[in-house]
Amino acid sequence: GHNGLVSAAYLQRGGLKTAVLERRHVLGGAAVSEEIIPGFCFSRCSYLLSLLRPQICSDLELKKHGLKVYMRNPHSFTPMLEEGVRGAPPRSLTLGPDLASNQKEIGKFSQK
């Protein structure tokens, strides 16, 4: 995954030879998208890029090597594992940068 790659890069910069292996059937660790619920593809945790320290980006010259960060809108989409009501599709929660839109979305579940 991406943490292993960062660790290996720092070790190599320090003069050590490294090999990075992936335990799972897909490459990328938390930075992959997978179908967790049938019909819905989810980011495993790549939203955590916000936790990537600027120092790592600088040290490893990630932008020079092609790193591009795209802001998501919406920020998240959460389908509910439920049957639809009276012919309506199952509920979902979509959140983004707009406070009023977020309040409206949350209001589908609670007016409080």
Image (cartoon, rainbow, N blue to C red):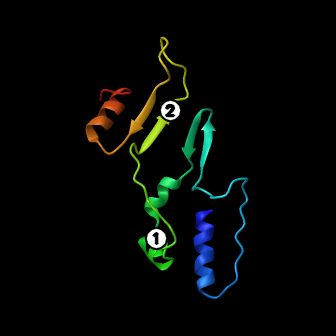
Q: Which residue is mark 1?
A: 63
Query: What residue would you read off at disc 2?
Result: 79
- Left or right: 26 with respect to 106? right
- At 72% across and 74% down in the image, what residue appears? 19
Q: Quadrant of residue 4?
A: bottom right
Above or below, 84 relative to 26: above
Q: Residues within 10 Å of mark 2 (few under 14, many from 20)?
A: few
Above or below residue 88? Residue 107 is below
Residue 88 point in image, percent of width and height: 47, 16
Residue visible at 55% across and 28% down in the picture: 81
Q: Position of residue 58 (x, y in %)?
A: 44, 76
Which amino acid, by three-letter code, is at mark 1?
Lys
Residue 109 position within the rendered picture, expressed as x and y whole percent measured from the top left: 38, 27
Q: Which residue is located at x 54 percent, y 24 percent? A: 82
Disc 1 secondary structure class? loop
* Residue at position x 48%, y 36% in the image: 78
Instruction: Categorize mark 1 by other alpha carbons within 10 Å: few (<14), some (14-19), many (20+).
Output: few
- Structural distance between the alpha carbons of marks 2 and 1: 34 Å
Task: Report the number of discs.
Answer: 2
Residue 54 on image: x %, y %: 42, 71
